[in-house]
């Protein structure tokens, strides 16, 4: 039983080098990388963290225990 070719030339007459370049390009192709999630905001630029001002807001109790 003969296997079906993975690649078939429909039109034109490519050289052996052109076919080799095409096969190499298709073989080295990778799926796109997954998106990188954004990094958590840094407290480096947070003026309240630099000045030692207590945090306010709905989650102030949770952030008050974190080291500065």
Image (cartoon, helix red, strand yellow):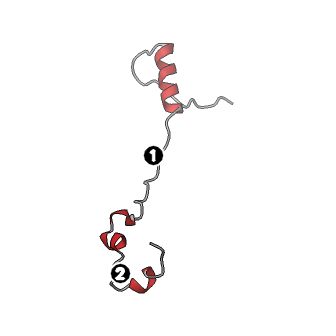
Give the secondary structure at mark 2.
Answer: loop
> Is there a contact, CB below 8 Å, between mark 1 and mark 2?
no
Mark carried by residue 3:
none
Q: Which is nearer the N-term, disc 1 or disc 2?
A: 1
Residue 8 in view in this figure: no
Image coordinates of residue 59 in percent, x first then y, are 39, 83
Is residue 56 rendered to the left or right of residue 23? left
Q: Nearer the viewer, residue 32 or 2?
A: 32
Residue found at x 65% / y 28%: 2
Is residue 46 rendered to the left or right of residue 14? left
Q: Nearer the viewer, mark 1 or mark 2?
A: 2
Give the secondary structure at mark 1.
Answer: loop
Q: Is residue 8 above or below residue 31?
A: above
Tell which residue pokes out farthest to the front in this image.
51
Q: Nearer the viewer, residue 50 or 61?
A: 50
Residue found at x 49% / y 36%: 29
Quadrant housing the C terminus: bottom left
Q: Is residue 52 above or below residue 5?
A: below
Instruction: Identify the residue position indicated by label 1 in the image.
Output: 32
Marks 1 and 2, how far apart at CA: 41 Å
Circle 2: is it few (<14), some (14-19), or many (20+) Cα within 10 Å?
some
Circle 1: is it few (<14), some (14-19), or many (20+) Cα within 10 Å?
few
Residue found at x 52% / y 20%: 20
Instruction: Identify the residue position indicated by label 2 in the image.
Output: 55
Image coordinates of residue 43 in percent, x first then y, are 38, 66
Residue found at x 69% / y 30%: 1
Image coordinates of residue 52 in percent, x first then y, are 36, 76
Q: Nearer the viewer, residue 7 or 66?
A: 66
Tally the marks.
2
Image coordinates of residue 32 in percent, x first then y, are 45, 46
Q: Is residue 63 above or below residue 34?
A: below
């Amino acid at each position: 039983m003969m296997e079906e070719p993975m690649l078939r030339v429909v039109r034109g007459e490519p050289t052996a080098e052109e076919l080799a370049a095409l096969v190499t390009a298709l073989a080295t192709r990778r799926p796109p990388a997954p998106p990188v999630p954004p990094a958590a905001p840094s407290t480096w630029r947070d003026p309240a963290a630099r000045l030692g001002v207590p945090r306010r807001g709905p989650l102030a109790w949770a952030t008050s225990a974190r080291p500065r």
